[in-house]
Image: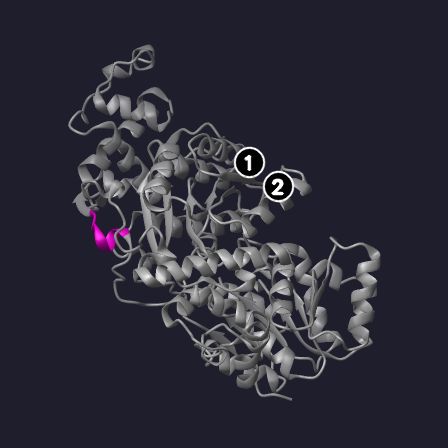
Amino acid sequence: MPSALETLQHVFGYDAFRGHQQAVIEHVVQGGDALVLMPTGGGKSLCYQIPALVRQGTGVVISPLIALMQDQVDALQELGVSAAYLNSSQDWRTARAVERDFLDGQLDLLYVAPERLLTERCLELMDKAPVALFAIDEAHCVSQWGHDFRPEYLGLSILHERWPHVPRLALTATATSATRREIAERLDLGDAPHFVSSFDRPNIHYRIIEKKDVKRQLLDFIKREHAGDSGVVYCLSRARTEEIAGFLAENGIEALPYHAGLGQAVRAANQSRFLREEGLVMVATIAFGMGVDKPDVRFVAHVDLPKSVEGYYQETGRAGRDGLPASAWLAYGLNDVMQHRRMINESEGDEVFRRRLGAQLDAMLGLCETVSCRRQQLLAYFDQTIEPCGNCDTCQTPPESWDGTVAAQKVLSAVYRLLRERGQRFGAGHIIDILRGKATDRVREYGHDTLSVFGVGADLPDTAWRSVLRQLLAKGLLAVDAEGYGTLALTDASRAVLKGEHTLLLRREAPKAARSARTTTPRAAPAADLPPEAQACFQNLRSWRSEVARSHGVPAYVIFHDATLREIALARPASVQDLGHISGVGARKLEAYGEEILRCVRG
């Protein structure tokens, strides 16, 4: 059998392994179990694909998404690897043909959905032919505290019980130390080594802005910085998804919606278009994206606050998988904080569950409100320490800290007096009107213009007070009512601030920070930093790739990634032998496309 390095070079066209890849692969080839954490785009799939090619038998990959299976099988077949999948999208004749190929030893890799694997028929199938390894992809789905929990993953402990001598890999891009422990426990990987790579994605520029007119802010961001780029916009609700997709389309951005309320055929068609066409924007709930391999997503935007740092990291990680510059843009505001607090109060779980949700939200709010490097704060959540990155909004345009103790006391006093003197609770907008001294009809109706706090905050504009209220909620100094009315109340922590026992530093946006253009990421990222003669060659190669992909019925990146085309455009190889030295050009692709590529280069 060929060695792991020979397989990497001959099949995949790469000269050397990256990071922990070699250690993981050698460990699994020798029959060991492993828990592997690598960031999106870090090369997790090679950690099981190469051992499956080196070891005897078929590598069985448990994957939660049909789209991911299809993409990976297409990509492997382009490399000359014999791969197939079993899932609900196939008719019974196709499934039987795949099963026969597996039993005849014709498959190097077989992708299976977890619910399919756990059927008695599929388990018996695995007993009848040698299995090289079991790879459990997106392993964080087994964690009940995780952001993508899938109950069917809990049954995968059967792999160790039924096939104790077959090596197993659990792989994920996102897991805290607590989630890692739960993965290891639930999958019986207690003795397996953990291979944990850096979570840092230095090519991603992180930016979080205050939400004002979010649709216009989003449109401005896309048109100024990512016109013509592929991107994903995440929304919290189905209705919001439809609204944002329609708004972008009306304003010249080709956008498609994706959420669980759409029919299966519509979702599949929209996802297929996103994967196969360039320059599309997918507006989606979190139902979209896990396992999507599209490498040239240039931006991920959030128009609603994510529920956790893990979810945010997983979703933003879908940008820039090819290693080229990409953006992670988030707009959030006071209403986001109140909505999430209310959702936690109304959740059906017990008190422990609600506390866990609250802690996850607190960490996400901490990331939004930090005055230090965003990337430092993000990676600290995963127990990783780095120096300030220089590639986030707070590094490039540092916000100010200011003593907000007096401002906070004014807010807390207003909430206290409403409750103590009138037995009333109101929402943020009404409290701001009182502080600003606005004698609105509602303020006069309740007689709140006679309160001692009426007008004490006239020195700050509405936007500043909304920022103060947002940060008080984020810091747990105000609470949202549990009845779902959006009114505010004091917390146990409020007393120390009201009494002046605690100085409160708040964040103030730097001037024009919300509109500052990102200078580190050129708009046309794949070609912008190429010399003129290479740009023409690169575009020629992309046009050729699109035609080939269309004729094969696969996404363009399955043929070659942009990074490989860039290298070809720069190197201008004159022979097939020269082309074989380009990263990402394996033996099968060299044989299939070598002469065509050389003609493009000469042209």
**Residue at 52% from the left image edge and 60% from the top image edge:** 557
Horizontal relation, residue 40 to residue 114: left or right: left
Of the pair 373 and 472, the residue shown nearer to us: 373
Rendered view: 444 above or below 361: above
Residue 465: x %, y % from top left: 25, 32
Rendered view: 244 above or below 9: above
**Residue at 17% from the left image edge and 44% from the top image edge:** 402
Q: Secondary structure at mark 1?
A: helix
Q: Does the magenta portion include 394?
A: yes
Rendered view: 464 above or below 538: above
Would you identify the image quadrant in which residue 304 lies? top left
Circle 1 crowding by C-alpha within 10 Å: few under 14, some 14–19, many from 20: some
Horizontal relation, residue 213 to residue 285: left or right: left
Of the pair 574 and 162, the residue shown nearer to us: 574
Q: Which mark is residue 260?
A: 2
Of the pair 106 and 19, the residue shown nearer to us: 106
Q: Amino acid at mark 2?
A: Ala
Q: Does the magenta portion include 116?
A: no
Lower position in the chain sequence, tag 1 or tag 2: 1
Q: Which mark is residue 238?
A: 1
Residue 337: x %, y % from top left: 39, 39
Residue 67: x %, y % from top left: 63, 55
Q: Are marks 1 and 2 in contact (CB under 8 Å)?
A: yes
Is there any visible trace of residue 220 in the rendered image? Answer: yes
Q: Secondary structure at mark 2?
A: loop
Magenta stretch, residue numbers? 393-399
